[in-house]
Amino acid sequence: MAKRLTHWTLLLYLAVLPMMAQVITETKEDEEEDEEDYGQVEYLGKPTKTYANARIFGMSPQRFVSLGWDVQLPYEMRFTELGTYATDSTNLNYEAEKGLATYTGGFRLQLMAPIISNNRFLWQSMLNVWDVQYTARKRSFENWRDSLMHLTDTLHQYGLKTSNWINTFYVPFDEKNFIIAQLQLDLSGNYDWLNPLEGQLLYSGAILYGQRPNDRKQWAVGISRTYRAGGMNYIPLLLYNWTSLSRKWGIEFLLPARGHGRYTFNPRSMVLFGYELEGSSYRIRQFSNDDVNFLIRRGELRFRLDYQRQISGFWWLGLQAGYRVMYSFDGDRLEKGQPDFFNLLRTHPYAMRNQTDGAFYFNISINYVSP
């Protein structure tokens, strides 16, 4: 548990540094804005109430349609035997099964549409489908016996899949204050696309309250139920978006899920630099039965550069390159009907432990963005 809390502390510390660096610039820019004399403006008729926009100037384009391909370079995986491992277990035998993944990758599809969109209420619905395929082989194992995972073979044959449906609601109260609510359903596992109900059904959500002081800055705080780190966690959220007066530099944070700095070359191209945490709990049907689900708690921490460029009209190209750190790839048994547990403060024993090397990764996507 201490290791996991250390990871979260490090992420928050690294993420806060850029925010501290821009305080002086922000103060100077706010003073420049205050110098404008708004007292000379005359209003005719009844004032019209205004509401805070959901986005600020200069942010990276919002994607309505995205089709991408994600690939990781080779890395080694090591697994313990199937068993029962306390959270504080030491001297584990990670050499029980060793595998080499020479290819990890697949397509990623995103479809998003506004259901209701006006100045008082915004409802957006999004569908994501990810297919992760493995080309993997065993490098060594002690003996072929039932207590071994043989997870290398299972990943090689079936891969991992995720389908999720996300609904986001944005409600401004006035020109400054707003709330954001999000509901998410996931099906994750190594199921066949013709029978996705063999996956693990997960639900997540978030609620945030925030303010938009001006057209270049917005912030919000809240809480989330999430599987991004593999297991289920309840964590605080910090949203912070900022664009400099020149609109060249910016920040796009939703901590601890992701955090990026932004530099805009021109209105047609920009680069983001930072990290994102992504993952889910995957039901492995070969190790599950009618009473118990076996779950791989997969969480990846991705440090990256993300270059985005307009191709034509609303079509943009996305290119990512970075380094993937495997935050979690351990296994759990969960009885059917049993509620999931709070992973950061877990006392639930593991069914399998894992060590996975880091790997460089690349991602390319074609995107249709919002006007």
Image: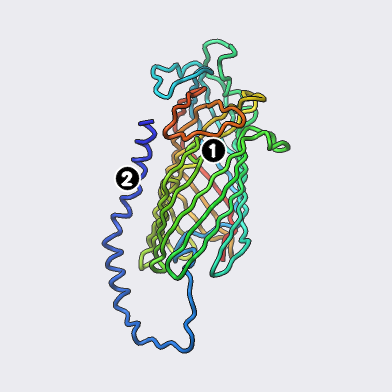
Q: Position of residue 96 (x, y in %)?
A: 50, 16
Location of residue 244 with respect to 45 vertically, above or below? above
* Label 1 Cα crowd, 10 Å radius (few <14 / some 14-19 / many 20+): many
Tell me if residue 161 can be seen: no
Give the side of residue 112 with respect to residue 61, left or right.
Answer: right
Relative image position of residue 113 (x, y in whole percent): 62, 59
Horizontal side of residue 38 vs 121, given as left or right = left
| Residue assigned mark 2 | 13
Marking on residue 280? 1
Rendered image quadrant of residue 189: top right
At which x and y percent is residue 16?
33, 50
Please tell me how crowded label 2 is: few (under 14), some (14-19), or many (20+) other residues with Cα within 10 Å: few
> Front-most of 284 and 251?
284
Camera-nearest residue between 284 and 156: 284
Q: Residue at x 57, y 47 (%)?
A: 184
Q: CA distance from mark 1 to mark 2?
A: 24 Å
